[in-house]
Image: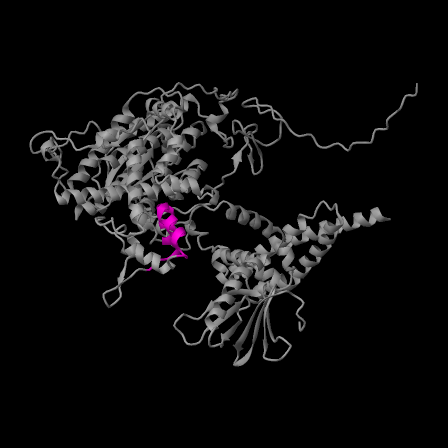
Amino acid sequence: MESEDEINILVIVIDINPIWWGQQAQREPKFTLSKCLDAVMVLANSHMVMARTNKLAIIASLYQESHFLYPSKNWKSGDDIASSGDGKYELLSVANDLFAEQIKKLIDRKVNCTQTETLLAGSLSRALCYINRVSKEVDAGQDMKSRILVIKAAEDCTLQYMNFMNVVFAAQKKNVLMDACMLDMDSGLLQQACDITGGLYLKIPQKIALAQYLLWVFLPDADQRSHLLLPPPVHVDYRAACFCHRNLIEIGYVCSVCLSIFCNFSPICTTCETAFKMPLPQMAKTKKKKVKTVN
Amino acid sequence: MASLSEEVLLVVKRVRQRKQDGTLYLMAERIAWGPEGKDRFPVSHLYADIRCQKISPDGKAKIQLQLVLHTGESSTFHFANESTALKDRDATKELLQQLLPRFKKKANKELEEKNRMLQEDPVLFQLYKDLVVSQVISAEEFWANRLSLSSVEHSLSNDSKQEVGISAAFLADIRPQTDGCNGLRYNLTSDIIESIFRTYPTVKQKYAENVPHNLTEKEFWTHFFQSHYFHRDRLNTGQQDIFSECAKQDEKGLKSMVTQGVKNPMVDLLALEDKTLDEGYGTAAAPSTSNVTKTLRENSNCAIIKRFNHHSAMVLAAGLRRAEPCSDQTSETSSTDGNSRDSDFFQPPLKKVKLQEAIEYDDLQSDCRRKPISLNLKKSDRYSHGPVPLQSQPYTSSQDILNSIAVIQQEMKSYKPRLTQVMSSSAASSAITSLSPGGVLMQGGSQQTVNQLVPSDLQSELKHLYTAAGELLRHFWTCFPVNTLFLEEKVVKMQSNLERFQLTKLRPFQEKIQRQYLSANLTAHLEEMLQAAYSKFQAWQSRRMMRKT
């Protein structure tokens, strides 16, 4: 019965930071943003074709904003759907066209950037909100499995740490898997996110074969992954960095009031200015001889 | 044992034991039997050793008494005197019933307690087996810390035993069975009898008056069940029934209950009458003309409802009435209804409290708690990046940025998805090889955890070793600082215990592991802990030597 099918929703968050991609185009002309977008489109189509009840959403993550590429508010369904002419499943052709159109519009705008880093936490929270909304629209009795795939190009932004961790814990609470596909360099934050939510983290060695990696590793959903032989999980470095020097430490001191981490002991916490009362070590008491004054 | 130095309480002649005639003597502290004419007592049991006594049922030809000891043995005595056998046996039984409880060994309770603890906790049982049975430490040391906790709990639980209430259905639970020939058999247990006495004090009074002078217990209960007091319709209560008084008292009690009413201002019993809304809705109150001539059915319904109410009120009252000692018997017999006690409790202050409860809500009161201390952060920007290490950001000049954006915009202007040319087949196949088992990305997946390498029986043995070692080390470390002589001796003893443990338990386990060619070093931590204990002991000993010299 159709109503008994599980709904699988995949939200792809692509990092299209133009600065990084522009530099990448100059570094490696074979793999440019268009190639990446093509590969993502292949994955998106494959996901929608796997089952009729699969749902998809694509979010583009730029500096300072995140944007829903599919499904979009501007999508006018029904009228003037240009048929692709090659007999493709209509849903796929509509999706692809919409995707291409939206991204062209997005890149074309003139933006003045004050920061150059990708707004990942914002995109992830929008993805979670979308998943939450869709899960409410589902019929009673239907299961919904959701996962988020992050395709990351640029480096991590540490300023987003708090928001990012909040998003990760919210995803864990909601049983949303977070997978990560790293194009360039490792990201400690995304490693932690994948470990906490139970997803896959992969840094791909060859960018031009991105589509193959996506289809092999990230297309199967959580149930199917247990039957497949996939790359083993990476060892995550969970060591915290101290607040004073930003060094990674294994054993440290934590203020009980504000929970800030220090590598050395100090009697006053520099973050919240709490003074700690430490018990002094017991001094060996020498016997005092009573001097009797004889009057 | 031959001389009777104790006081003799009862002598019963013609008692056979193991087909031998003899005499049974009950003394102050023991029971003994000797064969006829002889002076010695081959069978002698202390009352403290006897667990229970059993008697043969009434109908049997042989009249016997059996004593079961704590050890499980039993001795049987056959009362062979034709005329007085039954009396003898009963007299012996009564005397034993009085004497045995006095001598119940207190130490036995401890043994039972220990057994119970061992049975309830399998970990403790295993520890006991490992340490005491294999003679690593003695049983007293093992129980030294544990029993002190449990005996406190035990005594507390004994003192504050909760009272058992009365089931409202106790009369209905009796369930008479047909005897086969027109009779009914009622099975009365002591619980039921107690319930009847607690609920209906008048019946208890009648019992006290009549038994055992006028009637035997059996006759009393037969009368009780036969009387109409017990049956549904109490019609002919005017006859010669010992329970007719009870019925009259019940009526009086019910009337007084009704007049007292309920003192709770929130409860309005009169509002519970049937009300009529209109013709056909609810029951119309019968007009007053037919007051006198109530139908027979109405009468019996009225009577049975009254009896139900009375019964429920008595059950509740009996539950409220605490089991006071006999000094309070006068008040019990005088107040046949329990509400007279409760009326003492419902005083005006209670009325005020109940009214206040109904009016006010705690949640809506103003919050007059102390203000909590707020967190005062001086450098809150530290939280924005959190505990992540500083990463060097590559510097991009603004010119670079503008260039990159321009490039991308240029590229995207002419973007058309070409899904048939996403990648070349060589790229795809190299990606597949790196993802296949043994490929670049698949390294490190075939490591097995220690959990999977070591078989489960070895794992459980290791766990037992850990608990045993933990127990010994706990005993050892609690001896420090060594202040008293007792602790000194204990430390030395524990040291030897630890060495013995290592020799008898740890080494064989290590050899077993080696035999199975397991490379995992499972006992390194245990060895470390034992080494720490040994070095502490040596340091303490050398310091002691230095102090002595």
Residue B465 image position (x, y, % from top left): 58, 58
B198 inside magenta stretch = yes
- Is residue B269 or residue B336 the one in the foreground? B336
Q: Which residue lies furthest to the left in this view?
A: B279
Q: Residue furthest right?
A: A295
Q: Which of B373 and A181 is in front in this view?
A: B373
Residue A142 seen anywhere in this rendered image of the structure: yes
For residue B337, above or below residue B187: above
Identify which residue, B68 or B18, lies in the foreground.
B18
Give the residue displayed 8% in from the left and 29% down from the top: B278
The magenta segment: B187-213
Q: In which quadrant of the rendered image does the C terminus of chain A lie? A: top right
A236 sits to left or right of B339? right
Residue B464 seen = no
**Up/down of A27 relative to B214, above or below:** above
Would you say residue A85 sits in the magenta stretch?
A: no
Q: Where is residue B341 in the image (x, y as percent from the top left)?
A: 39, 35
